[in-house]
Image (cartoon, helix red, strand yellow):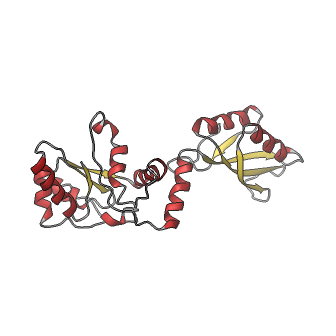
Amino acid sequence: LIIPIGGGGLIAGSAIAAKALKPDIEIVGVEADLYPSMYSAVTGEQRESGGQTLAEGIAVKSAGRLTMPVVKRLISGILLVDEASIEAAVCTFLTIQKTMAEGAGAAALAALMAHRDRFKGRRVGLYLTGGNIDPRILAAIMIRGLRREQKIISLRITIPDRPGVLGRIATLLGEMRANILEVSHRRMLLDVPAKGATLDLTIETRDRSHAAAIRERLEQEGFATVMLDAPGGREAGTA
């Protein structure tokens, strides 16, 4: 069983009951890595708690005084998950299971997805502990998920400033069955050549391979591209 940990009450009670029914069952806890209070208490490794997390329901700065000894005795380990893993888990619940989960509710799935090798080939039970999530946050998470999967990409292309170039790029994207969502045509900034312009394009694709094929085709036609929202917040290099 993978169970989220806040103050520790849920995992302590669940562990006592589960071990009574099946003594050899393994119980694994999960915390947001911004709030590793129980992890610190159990391992003795002091880590700071604080910051903005999607997993608000388990954002606890101090481990429960009564629950900590139970956790230490019955739990085989505590996994920490980052914000990107929690986002991915919320997206997975909604897109695959058609189930709405808040950040804390999706923490167990986030741990499973982030530590696949540990659980490979095993039967795993996940606690989904809540679905209380702001619709605006959910919408942002879903859009970010599409960007992470490169089903929506943003490209920057420097082009010669002459008639027909933008139309040529639009035609190429149409031939590749890509959908242009947004376009920004910049001429007046100092980092743009005097006889050039920069296009910032947001494009809808089928998947990563389609996105890569689009960039390759643009490169073949003489349009070098830079990915503006590569995973990790870094700009990707030219195609």
Of residue 227 and residue 26, the one placed in the foreground of this image is: 26
Where residue 100 sits: x, y (%)?
43, 58
**Vertical side of 156 occupied by 31: above or below:** below
The quarter holding residue 217 reads top right
Task: Kindly tell me whether residue 50 is visible in this rendering.
Answer: no
Q: Quadrant of the C terminus?
A: top right
Q: Is residue 204 left or right of residue 40?
A: right
Where residue 219 sits: x, y (%)?
72, 35
Of residue 112 and residue 39, the one placed in the foreground of this image is: 112
**Vertical side of 37 occupied by 88: above or below:** above
The quarter holding residue 177 reads top right
Residue displayed at 10% across by 52% down = 73
Q: Is residue 29 left or right of residue 130?
A: left
Q: Is residue 18 left or right of residue 231?
A: left
Residue displayed at 56% across by 47% down = 230
Of residue 149 and residue 82, the one placed in the foreground of this image is: 149
Single out the residue that lies furthest toward the right: 163
Residue displayed at 77% across by 41% down = 174
